[in-house]
Image: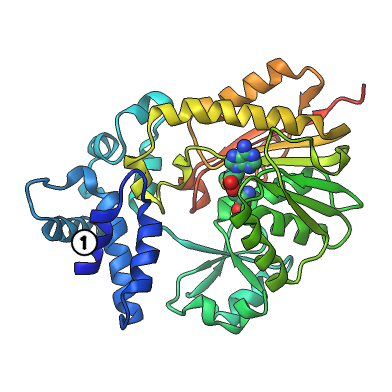
Amino acid sequence: MQWAARVVARSGPERAADRELRSTMKMASGLTPEETRWISRAVFAYFRWQGWLDGDRPLERRIDQAAGFADTFARKPGFVPDAELMERAVPAWVREAMDVPAEWIRALQAEPRLWLRARPGKGGELAAALGGEPDAVAGPVPDSVEYRGLKDLFRTPSFHKGEFEIQDVASQAVAHCCIAAMPAAEVRWWDVCAGEGGKTLHLADLLAGKGTVMATDRAEWRLDRLQQRLSRARIRGVRWELWDESLPVPGGGEFDGVLVDAPCTGLGTWGRNPHARWTVQPKDVEELVVRQLALLGRAAEAVRPGGRLVYSVCTLTRAETAGAVEAFGKAHADFEPFPFANPFVPDAPASPSHLFWPQVTGGSGMFVAQWRRRES
Ligand SMILES: C[S@@+](CC[C@H](N)C(=O)[O-])C[C@H]1O[C@@H](n2cnc3c(N)ncnc32)[C@H](O)[C@@H]1O
């Protein structure tokens, strides 16, 4: 309890709870895996159920209270009515910024699931190597596996052989959207906001050595991490460089596909990252939309005629999703909306944008839009 209380007390607008948890766990030696798991669940339950906690009680009691809510909700989800969930699980400004279905809030209050991405075509093999059902189960997008077991995955032979990445299932859907729009061939992709490489690695894997990916980001430490992941997974065909929108586009432009996985408010990740519900502010939405449009505008310059531009964000606010698409469309008559299939609902009609809700994905929420640059 003392460690959980330490993490909760030290988390704040400048110190995200997940980072605080990681650094506290490094300090706390001698904990068993069960104790570590308990601390992590207690911390996240606290922020997930913060809207119900009695502020007059000492912190340890509130952490206990939150754990009680989490347990009851897991056994009997109906014990909190929809109206109460919608009122207390997220701050009031969210109801102005987006549609708030009760199913989304219910998905937010449940414990998040752990998603793995196997190498292309190897989902079944990976699930079997991790023990098969009920511990490892195939997910809704190709090669995705939900892991429900208790193994320390980082110590498994499969991890060391680069046979999987830990990647949310909604995030996995993005590279499939890119490739569906432009099948693997001798194509050049630019992953503008590559970060630690979640989508870069996936794109390169799906290209199967036929195409190349230029990965850029403005954060050097993230690109360092990307390089480590590339070498563990033995993936080729990826180059990387530091870049932000003040610089010329890399590689001389003329890319067949450009992915802008833009910085965003991250409301789609509030299930596994509940602390952010209480730190993200409406002004963040306004500031990020400006950055998203600036990045999209620079990325658009680098798309060859007939090529694709893909925009993705792990958020659900109107301004950062449909609003950003509308603003980009108004300013770029040389791009036309490009319809593509929804990987979670493959039979649904193709559309130039899709919002993947957490209650549908079983993971985070994500928005993806695509355009094609007109030939002339
Ligand atoms: C949503 S994250 C990318 C996640 C990554 N694509 C993945 O799948 O793992 C957004 C990234 O944008 C980067 N970023 C933010 N502002 C930027 C800018 N102005 N220019 C370039 N990269 C930027 C951040 O450093 C961060 O890595």
Cβ of mark 1 under 8 Å from ligand 1: the answer is no
> Image height check: is 210 above or below 293?
below
Question: Could you tell me which quadrant the N terminus lies in?
Answer: bottom left
The residue at 65%/44% (across/down) is: 193
The answer to whether residue 147 is above or below residue 244 is below
Q: Which residue is located at x 31 percent, y 47 percent?
A: 12
Tell me the kind of residue under disc 1: Ala
Residue located 66% across and 67% down the image: 228
Q: How many marks?
A: 1
Residue 336's image quarter?
A: top right
Q: Is residue 270 visible?
A: yes
Decide: few, some or many residues near mark 1? Use Cα within 10 Å; few <14, some 14-19, many ≥20.
some
Quadrant in which ligand 1 is drawn: top right
Instruction: Name the residue rendered at 88%, 48% in the picture.
Output: 187
Question: Observer-nearest residue: 26 or 154?
Answer: 26
Q: Position of residue 355 (x, y in %)?
A: 56, 37
Residue 215 x/y as whole percent: 73, 51
Q: According to the image, label 1 marks what residue?
A: 5
Where residue 143 appears, as percent x and y from the top left, is 66, 64
For residue 343, above or below residue 265:
below
Apparent side of residue 349 relative to residue 180 in the rendered image (left or right): left
Q: Is residue 324 left or right of residue 251?
A: left
The quarter of the displayed image where residue 345 is located: top right
Quadrant occupied by the C terminus: top right
**Where residue 93 appears, x then y in whole percent?**
34, 27
Q: Nearer the viewer, residue 81 or 50?
A: 50
**Residue 370 vertical placement versus 272 (above, below):** above
Give SS at disc 1: helix
